[in-house]
């Protein structure tokens, strides 16, 4: 059994597959659609149309860079407001033409910078959460690497939420958590243990629906096999989401969101 | 023989060097202009400095009383409280932190739910308190906000929230994060029902609360000079390694950038809210 901190290292492994790898290997006829029609385009989020097992779909995901140059271009996978607004614009396109949506989460978080704040980072995420809840088309979300807080959730509301075995999904990065609690980012390992950010924990807490297995040692040790496993999980869950009648599907999504949390009354 | 007897008739005299006039708790120093403010006067001015208009953080109970007509309201959902689903321990176990927060704030959670009339309109209000674990949103706060919205939908009433929060509650991990989606979904339904939602931002409103219900108001009002943002200023400074501009992430900054509707002095807030409700509450359905 791997510790949460070990899984975090695997989730961040530089050779792990990214959203673009998923699109390249599991989708066909990908056409990237860019820009939010408001301010600009954000390379940290990729969006477009494609076919998945011959079904026309919309695919959206955060993209970290593979090398230094791409990492800078993609802002290390940390989206700005225009990224979230572009994502929603393309989701509404899917809704209009009654095509399913697949999103892939892999981000350290929404970008914390002056320009992002100026252009309403919080509003962009909040608006996505509200609008995604009522999308009248199937949405399948998969956390493939790092699920960094609100920045991840901003494209993460759906009918089915999948998560790779070694992916992490957390309210705050372990480094950030450690810096707040113990004033020491070096205590990230301790924080990772506290935060319950693994797929196993999150499935138990009712936050994700399905854990997608990875090859022993992590996805980066065998990308081919990892993507094959992801493909069959996506196919199965998309078929399930599509099989439900639209009005019923939205109702179920609301009910699922309604039940999130543990409280006493 | 009398039933009660004084144990001692002696009054203990205070030694001369310990005698002093107690002024503690009578005066408060203004954070901004340093003026000494008479505490009772400060309460009368709704915790706003009468010299420089600095807005002190305000406790939720006083704010609820101020909001509703003649301070008449019914508190709701006080039984909804936090659990410790993660068994979270940092320097102290989370349940201990909760107990302490309840004691020091006198509140069951970081938000008070209440119903009553505002300017004669039926209103469900959620008022947050920064004194309760930094006004953080965990499962209980998310559930309370959701219940508030659902009641408003059932009774065709308005929702008003007063945000005061550092963001999602770390000690409940990803469950706290999910509350953002949960309350936003409830607001989608309120929106479809064409019912009013006024969001008031107070100092501070950051993180997961800003990135969910606080920024989804039909109208968003902020108190002057409140810190409002997604990422905290320290996180931004560490990320970009440069000084932040003056006024950055204040109410006035957001107003300038088109992110909120109005900045209103607390002492003028109630008439503003009532004017907006007069506009939004429309029982005339002849067009439908």
Image (spheres, coloured by chain):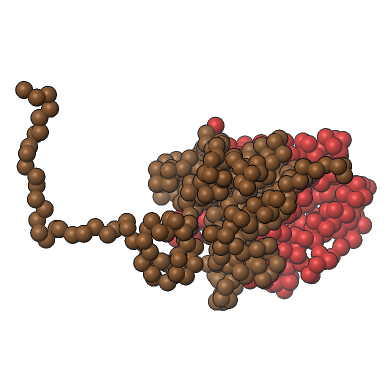
Chain colours: A red, B brown
Residue A253: image quadrant is: top right
How many numbered marks have been drawn onto this rendered protein structure? 0
Relative horizontal placement of residue A165, taking residue A31 as reference (left or right) = left
Report the quarter where the N terminus of chain B lies.
top left
Q: Nearer the viewer, residue A48 or B112?
A: B112
Q: Residue at x 80, y 67 (%)?
A: A38
Q: Residue A61 in the image: x percent, y percent? A: 77, 57
Q: Nearer the viewer, residue A241 or B67?
A: B67
Q: Residue at x 40, y 59 (%)?
A: B41
Q: Nearer the viewer, residue A199 or B275?
A: B275
Relative horizontal placement of residue B140, taking residue A98 as reference (left or right) = left
Q: Residue A2 in the image: x percent, y percent? A: 58, 46
Q: Residue at x 9, y 59 (%)?
A: B16
Q: Residue B247 in the image: x percent, y percent? A: 57, 73
Report the quarter where the C terminus of chain B lies.
top right
Q: Residue at x 9, y 34 (%)?
A: B7
- Residue B76 at least partly seen: yes
Residue B164: image quadrant is: bottom right
- Residue A171 at least partly seen: no
Q: Residue A136 in the image: x percent, y percent? A: 84, 44
Q: Is residue A9 above or below residue B156?
A: below
């Amino acid at each position: 059994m791997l510790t949460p901190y070990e899984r975090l290292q695997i989730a961040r492994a530089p050779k792990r597959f990214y959203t673009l790898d998923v699109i390249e290997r599991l989708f066909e006829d990908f056409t990237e659609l860019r820009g939010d029609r408001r301010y600009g385009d954000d390379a940290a989020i990729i969006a477009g149309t494609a076919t998945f097992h011959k079904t026309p779909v919309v695919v959206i995901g955060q993209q970290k860079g593979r090398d230094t140059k791409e990492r800078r271009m993609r802002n290390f996978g940390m989206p700005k407001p225009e990224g979230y607004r572009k994502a929603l614009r393309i989701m509404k396109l899917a809704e209009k033409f009654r095509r399913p949506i697949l999103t892939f989460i892999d981000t350290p978080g929404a970008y914390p910078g002056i320009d992002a704040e100026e252009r309403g980072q919080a509003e962009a995420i909040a608006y996505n959460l509200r609008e995604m809840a009522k999308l009248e088309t199937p949405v399948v979300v998969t956390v493939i690497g790092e699920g960094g807080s609100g920045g991840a959730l901003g494209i993460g509301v759906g009918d089915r939420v999948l998560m790779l075995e070694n992916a992490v999904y957390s309210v705050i990065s372990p480094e950030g958590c450690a810096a707040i609690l113990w004033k020491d980012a070096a205590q990230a390992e301790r924080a990772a243990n506290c935060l319950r950010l693994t797929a196993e924990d999150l499935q138990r807490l009712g936050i994700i629906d399905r854990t997608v297995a990875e090859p022993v040692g992590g996805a980066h040790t065998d990308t081919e096999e990892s993507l094959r496993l992801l493909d069959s999980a996506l196919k199965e869950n998309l078929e399930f989401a599509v099989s439900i009648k639209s009005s019923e599907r939205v109702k179920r999504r609301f009910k699922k969101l309604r039940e999130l949390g543990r409280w006493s009354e | 023989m009398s039933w009660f007897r004084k144990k001692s008739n002696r009054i203990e005299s205070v030694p001369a060097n310990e005698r002093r006039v107690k002024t503690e708790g009578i005066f408060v120093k203004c954070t901004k202009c340093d003026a000494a403010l008479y505490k009772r006067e400060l309460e009368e001015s709704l915790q706003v400095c009468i010299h420089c208009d600095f807005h002190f953080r305000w406790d939720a109970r006083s704010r609820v009383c101020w909001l509703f007509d003649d301070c008449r309201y019914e508190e709701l959902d006080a039984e909804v409280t936090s659990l410790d689903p993660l068994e979270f321990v940092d320097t102290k176990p989370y349940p201990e932190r909760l107990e302490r927060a309840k004691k020091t704030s006198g509140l069951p959670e970081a938000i008070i739910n209440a119903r009553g009339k505002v300017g004669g309109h039926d209103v469900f209000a959620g008022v947050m308190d920064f004194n309760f674990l930094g006004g953080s949103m965990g499962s209980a706060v998310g559930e309370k906000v959701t219940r508030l919205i659902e009641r408003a939908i059932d009774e065709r009433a308005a929702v008003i929230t007063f945000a005061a929060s550092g963001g999602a509650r770390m000690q409940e991990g990803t469950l706290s994060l999910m509350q953002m989606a949960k309350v936003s979904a409830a607001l989608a339904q309120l929106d479809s029902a064409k019912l009013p939602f006024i969001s008031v931002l107070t100092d501070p409103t950051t993180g997961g609360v800003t990135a969910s219900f606080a920024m989804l108001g039909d109208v968003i009002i902020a108190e002057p000079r409140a810190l409002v943002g997604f990422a905290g200023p320290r996180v931004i400074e560490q990320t970009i390694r440069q000084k932040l501009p003056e006024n950055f992430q204040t109410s006035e900054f957001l107003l300038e950038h088109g992110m909120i509707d109005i900045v209103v002095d607390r002492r003028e807030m109630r008439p503003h809210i009532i004017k907006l409700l007069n506009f939004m509450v429309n029982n005339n359905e002849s067009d439908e």
